[in-house]
Image (cartoon, coloured by chain):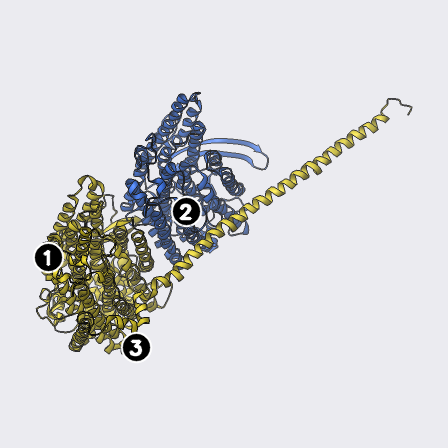
Chain colours: A blue, B yellow
Amino acid sequence: MFEFLGAGPLTWITFLPIIGMVIIMMIPTGKDDRSKAASRSMFQWTTVLFTFVQLVIAIMIFMNYDPTMLGVTNADTFQFVDRVDWITLHNVPIFGELKIEYFVGIDGISAPMILLTAIVCFFATFASFNIKKAPKGYFAMYLLLDAAMIGVFVSLDFFLFYVFWELMLLPMYFLIGIWGGPRKEYAAIKFFLYTLFGSVVMLLVMIALYFAAGSFNMLDMMNVEGYADGSLLAKVNEGWRLIAFAGLFVGFAIKVPIVPFHTWLPDAHVEAPTAISVILAGVLLKMGTYGMLRIAWPMFPDAVAYFSDWIALIAVVSIVYGAMCALGQHKVGKRDLKKLIAYSSVSHMGYVMLGMASMNETGMQGAIFQMFNHGTITAMLFMIVGVIYDRAHTRSLDDFGGLANKMPIYTGIMTIAFFAAIGLPGMSGFISEVMVFLGAFATYPIHTVISGLGIILGAAYMLWALQKVFFGKLPERWSGPWDPTKKIYKHDDVNAREIFSLVPLAIIIIYLGIFPNTLLDMMSGSVHTLVQFVKTSALYSAGM
Amino acid sequence: MASETLLQLSTVVLLLPLLSFVILIFFGKKIGRPSGVIGTSILGLNLVLSGIIAFQKLAVHADTVLIQTKFTWFNIGDFPFQVGFGVDNIAAVMLIVVNLISFLVHLFSTVYMEGDKRYPRFYAYLGIFTFSMLGIVLANNILFMYVFWELVGLSSYLLIGFWYEKDSAANASKKAFITNRIGDLGFLAGMLMLFFSYNTFMFDEIFAQIGMGIMPMADFSANGELMLTLAGIFIFMGAIGKSAQFPLHVWLPDAMEGPTPVSALIHAATMVAAGVYLVARVFPMLSADALTFIAYTGGFTAFMAATIAITQKDFKKVLAYSTVSQLGYMIMALGVGAYTYGFFHLVSHAWFKGALFLASGSVIHAMHVAMHHAHNHSMDAQDINNMGGLRKTMPKTYITFLLMTLAISGVPLTSGFLSKDGILAGTLAYAQLTGGVNWLIPLFGFGAAGMTAFYMFRLLIVSFHGKPKTDIAAHTKENKIPIVLPLFVLSILTLWIVYSPNPTDASSGWFYKSMKAPATVVPAEYQHDFLMPINKDNGYALAAHETVVENHAVEEALAHNDIPELEGEHAVEGDVVHDAAHAHDAEHSHEGEHAHEAADTHDDGHSHDVANTHDDGQGHEADAHQEHGNNHYANKFEEQIHKAHLPAMILSILIAGFGIVLAFVIYQFKIISADKLEANFKRLHTISYNKWYFDEIYHATFIGITVWLSKIMALFDGKVIDGIVNATAVVTRGFSYFIGHFDNKVIDGLVNLTASATGFGGIVLRKFQTGRVQT
């Protein structure tokens, strides 16, 4: 359905940004200042155009999504499927016949992620408008990153998934490494190596799974009974299966990130340009948990059961430890607002893990909903930091105070975002946190209550930051207008472009806080299927 | 009025203040001055509507315990998360309390906040506060309770920090929010326990299941008593935060940094009462141990806060600690089982404390105006030692303030007397029934009562009587009507006649009769025997019986998403309930039967309409029960409280009288010198004046440790964890360097060696390959 030029919407939504990238590459940069400026705005608006069309397709997919089609393990019930043979090699040594498919489709687990990616990428484009250095490369890389992220979420073939997963690394490395802050090289290489380490492990497990299942199709890989006899992963709960799961888990955990694999995140966030921080926190972190849901959980139910106590423990540690590190930012270092928010991400992604460890529908659905909500909320938070950084060229909390009178609209928006991050009812984050708590409590009551400390600490660091930036007295140095020439900023408060990128996110956050069913209905069937599949599989009980 | 209309009207009452918020937050700047008028008129309309609701509920629908609606907020798979709103008698009264105080504060602020540059914003915040508070009042389920509970926290944060340029205000708002969050964690834990155990958020459904003997967390622990007590205490933790009970009371006095009308509305009359209201809501499920915990918390708070209020110099601080103390009273009342008097005190306290704060606002405003005229901006306008003689300059404020002081001191002919007297009788009855160490409770109660009378009259005498202590005080002027009128309205409501024709006993009035304690659902072995209903029919299950479930109107309005039919799910739940009832032992079989029926009724409620529920005969049973119940006391406690009433009354009048006389002796006639007293009791005075050093202790311990720990964590993260990562990199690089060299020197050397060896060999061998065969 909705085919255009022979390709379905998922193919379009994935490769559209690549077309955009090619177009940007063909636009000349210009020689003198005027033509440079002109081409810069060409790059910007091309990116806006392509991400906008992508958003429109994502909304179309959302509107036409059928929640009764469950997906997860059944290839026939995935939606918007495009499936063709991609690479077929005969008589490959060891492998025999090697068949890799181009197989994309979505179900209730990936559909919200597609929507999230499209939303975040579109609005983050506006936060990229102040990129002056090598805009051509920036926007080309931006669109490539966009395509790779969507690709990860739609792939149903592990090999294809892996290709997109790796493809994502490249633009991210350059985007941080070239357009980042003072320690950009360090941050970029750290991000790259960390993730690469994860991918190498993932590659090994993928190959092992291929030998077991005889295909790269993820759905075949979930069918453990169909594994070839004698293959490494065939026997239930054998050491190799546990090791393979642990490998996959670490690979994904680095992306989430889960303590203790998280230290790339604060550095990457602090150094990355605003829009890239937004994408990093808004979408990239979700790939880790998405990978677990799509790959690790259904393929290794026995190992999930075996490790679930540990996963819950790690989740609690992430929640509390991340929150404490965020709170600790006001005692150590440069009191960087971005770093504080980066640590808050560690804490909030811990809730996702806790929900996933609970292995029941409430917790699991809460986890996926929390992925979406954290995506929108943190995207907003990083954009907000970008707004003052653009003006003041500092993010240190010590440099601010009393901005509430100078920037009232901005203060209002930031208050919404901060309280959303605290999990205030009426905002989407509350629903997902409560769902996670309700689900996790059924399995791990003590863990859940301890992780409740996160909501107290969360209030503490968020309100502390809010107070530092907005309340009290305005420092002398900011008493004048941000931009006396009025060229860039006509008013001291947020400008139209910034409002345009922030307010829609705020509306989404509040809307989903009041009407969560809009999204929950989309995912509930698939989550049910996933939980049932993992829990009722014979492997699960074997792993207990 | 039909039940549906009543509920629809309640929804309107709930949403109107939200409308006010939305209008004023977005268009306030454009609207400007008239914002106040808009906010005030919306609240005026709301007050009228809630008056209608309350009348309808208390007079017309008096037989229906709870009129409620349930609808699905969101689904998890097939499981609907049900929420809803309901109106019972205490909710109906609370609607009036919240709306009236809020309306008067709106009115008051038109003058008080006149000159503020964020005037429209102030009204917007008042709107969202009122909305959230009404949500708490109308919630018939624990999830909505929690939702609006948090929203109240937000509004309070915004209003305390309204003058955020002041660091003290910004700090106070943060402190309030975080302290409340600590309590909320307990509330959340309690909610999780209940939802996990009963698969519902609805109070009536939870109670019905407990009434059947299903204890919380049965899967985890066989100790049902402990689990039930824990659930009760966890939920009560929410109340400890919001109602400023020991040990989380420290935020409330700081909250006085907000504008004074806010103090009146939020931190005296309504929001802080939310905790008491919550305890009243879950009262039926509180076990004996939970109740004891609650009674001691409340009693200690009442006593401790009173000792602090005695020495404070700031006008608002005295009132703030008095609020903490009075809230302790209410909590204590609920803890000993004197439910009706606890709730009564909530209402009467709302009036007189609201008025006391508004009067203090009137005084502070007058002081500010006088200071403004005298061009004096350095004096502390809130220090009572700068006042004096205000009786002459502000007679109207004085009269009302005097009346309120009488009420809070528990002088006869006031509502405060009726409610406080009931509470004291309750503590006495409790001590008589339980004995032993529990005599501490009445000791706390009577002690606090004496101190209350003393410090309130001290405040009155020092600030209003005598000669002006400063020029400023001498030049104060009475305020305009919008400030004075609310004081008079509230004064009328503090007269006994509003509640009961008999000025000595509330139990003959309409209020007492309408606000009877709901019977406990806790199994007899976990509950005080004196709280068990004498008449076995009196179980909460019966209340569930009469519940009117009205499902459609709000559902359609709120959830435009398609909501799947829920009958199936509920039928399943009903079956579970059924089995449990049968499995239960014979002792409870009677109750069990009833509850079982109730559950069935509830299931049907989805399809039945209101009329059916009343017609199908169960209504008759309820009526018969009602008559039956009038002839007897509901439980032994009620009987005992009746007996304790006279001694408690005499004692409380004597003690209050002593406090008042002492205040006059020291501050009016100065027979005993206050300074000498202070010197003689230096140590006690210092402890009291410094509020028992709670803030300092918390800073040194909890806050200090948390901050220290988070600093250590952040350092640990940066140095150790990241250090390991970087060290790995360094090691790898070193290793690579080594490998590089190895490669360069050794491997490559070997290669080169081989090459040169080969070359050399070549040269050597070439010698043999001369072609001269002969060699």
Which one is closest to the eye, mark 3 or mark 1? 3
Q: Secondary structure at mark 1?
A: helix
Cα distance in 3D space between marks 3 and 1 = 45 Å
Give the x, y percent position of residue B144.
25, 54
Question: Quick one: label 3 or label 1, which is nearer the N terminus?
Answer: 1
Quadrant of the drawing holding the N terminus of chain B: bottom left
Q: Which residue is mark 3?
A: B437
Q: Does residue B341 appear left or right of residue A276 in this picture? A: left
Chain letter behind tag 1: B
Q: Which residue is mark 2?
A: A340
**Number of residues whose C-alpha sits closer than 10 Å to that of mark 1, classed few (under 14), some (14–19) or many (20 or more):** some
Give the x, y percent position of residue B737.
63, 40
Q: Amino acid at mark 3?
A: Val
Same chain check for tags 2 and 3: no
Chain letter behind tag 3: B
Cα distance in 3D space between marks 2 and 1 = 53 Å
Image disc number at residue B56: 1
Count all numbered tags in the image, as a single digit. Answer: 3
**Residue B12 in the image: above or below residue A7:** below
Which quadrant of the structure image shows residue B416?
Answer: bottom left
**Number of residues whose C-alpha sits closer than 10 Å to that of mark 3, classed few (under 14), some (14–19) or many (20 or more):** few
Which one is closest to the eye, mark 2 or mark 3? 2
Q: Amino acid at mark 1?
A: Gln
**Residue A206 in the image: above or below residue B468:** above
Does residue B347 appear anywhere in the picture?
Answer: no
Give the x, y percent position of residue B222.
37, 67
Q: Amino acid at mark 2?
A: Leu
Quadrant of the drawing holding the C terminus of chain B: top right
